[in-house]
Image (cartoon, rainbow, N blue to C red):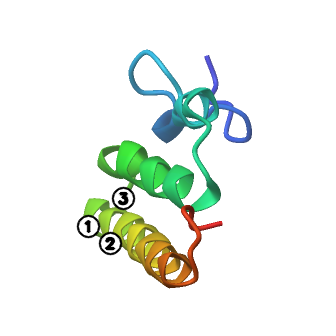
């Protein structure tokens, strides 16, 4: 069977769940959802280290937002 490169590429469909299903079920925000996406797919793409670095980039950005908003009395990053 031919790979569906638009809806279900090979690096999306390893394991029981697609990463997007987990992101939606857990109701993750943009930053955390993207971090999870890069982590979940890293082993199945060309450069695992680059994907893990990108996940860290999203986490670091989210942490900065949390810290900034904490200073302003907000509980969440967004």
Spatial distance from mark 2 to mark 1, Cα to Cα? 6 Å
Instruction: Tell me the residue that label 1 is attached to.
Output: 49
Residue shown at 41%/27% (left/top)?
Answer: 14
Mark nearer the viewer, 1 or 3? 1
Q: Position of residue 30 (x, y in %)?
A: 63, 57
Relative to residue 34, is residue 40 drawn left or right?
left
Instruction: Tell me the residue that label 3 is attached to.
Output: 46
Spatial distance from mark 1 to mark 3, Cα to Cα? 9 Å
In this view, 8 is above or below 77: above
Position of the N terminus, as image quadrant, is: top right
Residue shown at 73%/41% (left/top)?
Answer: 6
Q: How many marks?
A: 3
Instruction: Tell me the residue that label 2 is attached to.
Output: 53
Residue shown at 39%/76% (left/top)?
Answer: 60
Relative to residue 21, is residue 38 drawn left or right?
left
Residue shown at 54%/62% (left/top)?
Answer: 75
Residues at badges 1 and 3 in contact (C-beta under 8 Å)? no
Mark nearer the viewer, 2 or 1? 2
Q: What is the residue that sits farthest to the front in this orientation?
A: 73
In this view, 51 is above or below 40: below
Position of the C terminus, as image quadrant, is: bottom right
Q: Rate crowding at label 1 as few (under 14), some (14 to 19) or many (20 or more) other CA atoms within 10 Å.
A: few
The answer to which image quadrant residue 67 occupies is bottom left
């Amino acid at each position: 069977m031919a790979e569906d490169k638009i809806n279900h590429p090979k690096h999306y469909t390893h394991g029981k769940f697609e990463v997007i299903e987990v992101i939606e079920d857990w109701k993750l925000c943009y930053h955390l959802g993207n971090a999870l996406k890069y982590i979940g797919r890293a082993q199945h793409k060309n450069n695992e280290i680059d994907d893990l670095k990108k996940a860290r980039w999203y986490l670091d950005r989210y942490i900065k937002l949390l810290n900034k908003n904490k200073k302003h009395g907000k509980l969440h990053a967004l």
